[in-house]
Amino acid sequence: MASARKRIWGWYFFDWASQPYNTLLLTFIFGPYFAEIARGYYMGEGLEPEAAKAAAQAYWGWGLAIASLSIAVLAPILGAIADGTGRRLIWVWVFSAFYVIGSMGLWWVAPGGDAGMLFWAVCLFGIGFIGMEFATIFTNALMPSLTQADDLGAVSGSGFAFGYLGGLLALILMLLFFAEGADSGKTLLGTEPLFGLDPEAREGTRAVGPFAAIWYVVFMIPFFLWVKEPRTDARPLHVGRAFASLRDLLRSLRFRTSLAAYLASSLFYRDALNALYGFGGVYASGVLGWSIIQIGIFGIVGAVTAMVAAFIGGRADKAFGPKPVIITSIIVLICVCGVIVGMTRESLWGFAMDPASGLPDQIFFACGALIGAAGGSLQAASRTMMARHTSPDRATEAFGLYALSGKVASFMAPALIALATMASGSQRIGIAPLILLFLIGLVLLFWVKPKGEMPA
């Protein structure tokens, strides 16, 4: 039996192994690459450049929305089933397979494809995204059994910090040795991609999918070796009993004001954050005209600040509780969204800027640093706050509801961005709905108890 310390480190390795899906695929490499090839397709269909950019962002938004809706519907049900059987790790294995298959398949998303290529690109990304999110639900559910309640904030923060470090290292390796600029065909080192990958066919950038899959397989080994489930009696699968348990939990929300308010709050603010991650690279590519290499460097800045802030935020969480950390992070993100919506290469909320200067790029780099810092702290503190509202024997079911609260708004956030982008014809204005979602989440925190449902 692994020691308690080794078990915690094994649990940390899930964050290390899975973070590249967010860092490399969702935000900084594949997302912007998809925007490039989708813009090319739409321009080939006769759309003007600005309209093609908006259409590409909308397509990506609807794909994320559908994947998120699938997670929202199934997460609490699977959580109840897992708690009913007393087994969670088997589900981590199952959804790890989704992660690997989906990310591996992205290798075949080549430039110059037709509408079918765009469709399969989003489908494969969605399969891996669903796998990553569901595996996260079941690993999060193990957190209350890892340590004492007072240490959960530090453990959660350290886990996110370790995960961001993994995502940062993976991003640096991709930029140095694989991802090529669309114009230069060179990596950040100024060389062609490793292993003879063809830069004209964008094989270096397309390798991000297999790279993420291999990374996950290798670094999940410590997780599966060291993380064992708490000893419980094996129970047969009883779907009816699992649904009854879930129904009872949902009904109990009428009498659990703090939990209900927290789930509603996180429904808005976490999914606004996820949408900000999902569209950050696409925005930089379309509005500022950044290359994959520039977006990757932007990702490095954000990952570094996220890693540092998640670690510091975990300590602040332990000292002051998760609620103040959550509130501060949301306020920072609202301010950042305000800057993003009001900025073009020529101006910032009416104040003129020289489009040939580096000032717009510097402002967006600063925004990226703040998004990374606030987002890292927010995710770590949010996980702790959820753990303060549940017990180890009902944790998967509770984190299933937590995922539901995240993914319902995650369905809405990309859809709202897609609708706002289509209505305005502007990628920049399309980000505006996130400000409203963050504000709603902030207001709902008023009813959340600082200690959750732990004894005072």
Image (spheres, grey):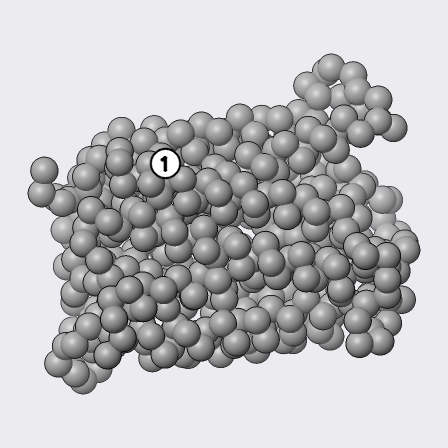
Place of residue 352 in the rendered image (x, y in percent of width and height, measured from the top left): 78, 16
Q: Is residue 125 above or below residue 217?
A: above
Residue at screen point 32% across, 53% down: 155
Which residue is the site of mark 1?
326
Label 1 environment density (alpha carbons within 10 Å; few <14, some 14–19, many ≥20): many
- The answer to whether residue 171 is seen in the rendering is yes
Residue at screen point 56% across, 57% down: 167
Residue at screen point 26% across, 33% down: 320
Left or right for 54, reference 395: right
Q: Quadrant of the C terminus?
A: top left
Left or right for 58, reference 314: right
- At mark 1, the secondary structure is helix
Residue at screen point 49% across, 79% down: 97
Left or right for 56, reference 354: left
Residue at far top of view = 351
Q: Where on the picture, by quarter, is residue 172?
A: bottom right
